[in-house]
Amino acid sequence: MGLFSSKNEGLVAIDISSTGIKLVELSAVRSGYELKSMAVVTLPRDAIVENTVIDSMAVSQALLDVIEEAKPATRRAAIAVSGNAVIIKSVMMPISTEFELESEIEFEADQHVPYDIEDVYLDFQILGADVDDPSQMEVVLAACKREVVDDYQLVLSEAGLETKCVDCAVFALENAAEVCGLVENDEAEEAFEGEGDYAIALVNIGANLINVNILKNGQMAFVRDQFYGGQNLTEEIQKEHNLSYQAAEAMKKESFSDVSSEALERFYVGLTSELVRSLDFYAANHSESPVQHLYITGGCALVPNIAEELEQRLGIAAKVVNPFHHIKVNQKKFDQAYLDQIGPMMMVPVGLALRSFDT
Ligand SMILES: Nc1ncnc2c1ncn2[C@@H]1O[C@H](COP(=O)(O)OP(=O)(O)OP(=O)(O)O)[C@@H](O)[C@H]1O
Ligand SMILES: [Mg+2]
């Protein structure tokens, strides 16, 4: 599912976010996928604020830099949108075919999307028939403000990139999770055989946003983008140590052991309460199938011991996921130690790059 896409001969994922641009290109190989090209460049602060390109010169330059570094084989790009620009709703509709739904979806979306329907890009996915009422089916609707997509498309075109696919970060997260074997595995199989449920939460914690996707029996049961992330920790460090933003970022990334436990504690209290909100929301509709695993990705997955902390605070088994441990990597071309280090941060762009192989 994507907000729009055209049938493709290869795509390069360009994940533009508040702190930087990440590029990932994959190829299909016998064992699954192989990393073809990859690069990350940082953006100056405030170049992009809440999905709006403020400093288009800086963003264009960063795009040129990321292309120069990675040298992808294609200029056909897949991009991700998230946050306030995106509305994702699960709705019940009478059973119909995908073809029939095409013509009804605008009318349906109009009732759920708080923007003028002319101003959004729309897509949908049929999840399946309702268990309680077989005449109804569950449909996931995704809408994104056109101005946000058009804005990105413009800067991309200035850097010689053609936007061929727009996806929601939460869906990219799910596609990457499948490739990492988090969705269909022995544990899921076991639960299924025992007629139990298997629920996992994918939690991608970036600088400003947490993309949450809770899957029950392999199907999307709850998605949300929450406003919280690594920036909150940086701000706590700034306050506690009386540092500039840059110095606090550097302390966080380069000398984490110097970070005061008070700053860290406040960050975790905030993070936990955000995650509890999503988990509670999910539990309200699925109390019989609690989340069994929490899979952590995003830049904050690089915070030392975050999985242990969240496991303890939430009482749910938690693990950091590195997508590069589940795809083939040519050791001659890429620095494995670097991929081991930053991999968890690349989950969304990896998922986005998988859109190349949609049929
Ligand atoms: N080694 C590290 N240790 C701790 N935090 C880190 C490390 N590396 C990156 N981060 C933090 O991760 C965050 C960036 O993560 P990520 O790249 O996933 O976010 P983003 O996609 O740019 O942001 P968003 O999606 O929220 O707009 C920043 O807050 C950064 O400080
Ligand atoms: Mg992000």
Image: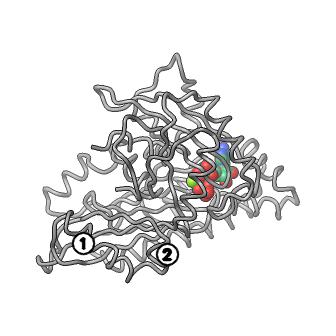
Instruction: Give SS at disc 2.
Output: helix
Above or below: residue 20 compared with residue 113: above
Residue 57 x, y percent position in the rendering: 75, 47
Q: In the picture provided, is 185 more to the left or to the right than 77?
A: left
Classify mark 2: residues with Cα within 10 Å, few (<14), some (14-19) or many (20+): few
Q: x%, y% of residue 260?
A: 77, 57
Q: Nearer the viewer, mark 1 or mark 2?
A: 1
| Kind of residue sitting beneath label 1 | Glu
Left or right, 19 with respect to 174, comes to right
Please tell me the numbered disc located at residue 153: none
Residue 345 seen: yes
Percent coordinates x, y for residue 54 in the rendering:
72, 59
Q: Which residue is mark 1?
A: 138
Given residues 338 and 261, the one toward you in this image is 338
- Is residue 300 visible in the rendered image? The answer is no
Residue at 37% across / 35% down in the picture? Answer: 9
| Residue 60, quarter of the rendered image | top right
The label shown at residue 277 is: 2
Find residue 218 and report its horizontal and vertical position in percent.
27, 57
Give the camera-side residue of 77 and 211: 77
Mark found first going from the N terminus, 1 or 2: 1
Q: Nearer the viewer, residue 198 or 78?
A: 78
